[in-house]
Image (cartoon, rainbow, N blue to C red):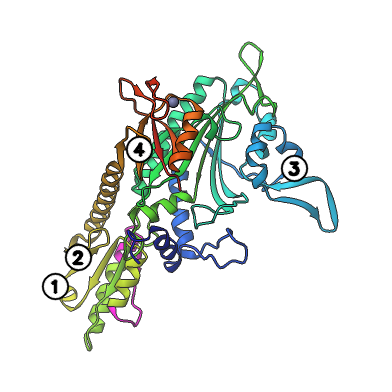
Amino acid sequence: MKKEENFSEWYNAVVEENNLTDKRYPVKGLNVWPPYGWKAMLLIDSKVREEFDSRGHDEVNFPLLIPEDQFQKEKDHIKGFDSQVYWVTKAGDNELDIKLLLRPTSETAMYPLFSTWIRSHADLPLRVYQIVNTFRYETKQTRAFIRVREIHFIEGHTCHATFQEAEGQIAEDLDIMRGIARALCLPFRIHTRPEWDKFPGAYYTKAIDTVLPDGRTLQIASIHQYRNNFSIPYDIYFEDEDGQRRPVFQTTYGLSERMLGAVVAVHGDDKGLIFPPPIAPIQVVVVPVLKKGESEIIDKAAAEVAARLVAAGIRTRLDSRDIRPGNKYYEWEGKGVPLRLEVGKREATDKFVTAVRRDSGKKQSIGTASLEKDVSELLDSIRENMLRIATEREKAAEHRVANLKEIGPGLNIIWWCGNETCGKTIDEKTGSSILGIPEWKTSGSGRCIVCANETEIEAVVSKPM
Ligand code: ZN
């Protein structure tokens, strides 16, 4: 399957053929995680946990079902989600007095409890996160990891005494994103979403977008400043040092399985997946290349290599199945294993292995004396190379455009007056949308691409996936 010719078909084929997902479950948009795909997701989750935990966030787990009356306390929030909610109206034979909904996100499950957890300034900041499934009735065409109805979701929720402290949390969230993205070898951009596209109920939303190979962009995470928008309706107040009762300031952070979708889309090639070593379910596959009559020494050498790597903490698979080595190479390349080690007669006798990199296809010999160290260094070098290639491609996708006709695939940098009417005109006339205001700022000014009014605002336009 050619990635460049039909990215969409390539993506669908590559995630199913290589056991990342199984879409045959009888409910559309509720996909099954087979072992290989689930392992990759859990490795991403581990990285997320490491980043959150090391910054003082605690993991929690709230119920899946939310009562309707709690959900309706924040009007803007329900307005944004009500068309996407799954409802539970019966329990056994009984109609429920208060309907329950499957969480589309957990603000309205958590915040009634936060109002009991937080009493005084000594209880702040409160910083928690959970990794759970959420449900949203998606009406657009579903796509594995990218647009699903049951979402593997990571949500961080924080409460602070002041707006400034909440702003500090958002800056730290961006650092957390940098740490995660490094493991995924994914370049990303931060855009403050326009007013009409922010999270329902938020004061503002910063989104993390990455560029896909077909020039569209994918939002892989979002960070929201809520100010007091939720704490007032949910009664999350604290007593400050002067004994005054004040509402807390809140932020949230949402990440999801889309990170895995982005990894597949950005790094894969015509042969299949390419996993960044930090999250590869199998980092190294060891393949004995057997010749008749010499299998014993080769098998033994290959098993020893694999055992040493496992002992060194490297996720290694010894593939001793009785099929041709060529078939094994094909399969593991498809599954995106970053490094293959071949052990044949010459390798076994002369004490080395032949290493083949998945990112570049390059072959090299590694002496078994320094096996663990050399393999680790190779995996590091693969990670660096993957990030470098992806970053170069992302840079190449960025271009400045001076009129609507020039807007095309990739990241289009424009001057924008800031008005919603002009923003919506871009949508209507080009099919691309304003992603938002980038973090960087060019000094100077230009003319709005739609109304030609003088402006100092630069915005990024793209076609979101
Ligand atoms: Zn304008």
Of discs 4 and 1, which sits in the foreground? Answer: 4
Residue 412: quarter of image: top left
Residue 157: quarter of image: top right
Q: Marks 3 and 1: CB-CB under 8 Å?
A: no
Amino acid type assigned to the residue bearing label 2 in the image: Thr
Sequence-wise, the earlier of marks 3 and 4 is 3
Q: CA distance from mark 3 to mark 2?
A: 61 Å
Q: CA distance from mark 3 to mark 1?
A: 68 Å
Please tell me whether residue 112 is drawn above or below residue 313 in the rendered image: above
Write down the residue under mark 1.
350
Tag shown at residue 412: 4
Sequence-wise, the earlier of marks 3 and 2 is 3
Q: Marks 4 and 2: CB-CB under 8 Å?
A: no
Of discs 3 and 4, which sits in the foreground? Answer: 4
Write down the residue under mark 2.
368
Sequence-wise, the earlier of marks 4 and 1 is 1
Tag shown at residue 67: 3
Some atom of ligand 1 lies within 8 Å of the CB belonging to the residue at label 1:
no
Of discs 4 and 2, which sits in the foreground? Answer: 4
Region rendered in magenta = 308-325
Quadrant into which the N terminus falls: bottom left
Q: Marks 4 and 1: CB-CB under 8 Å?
A: no
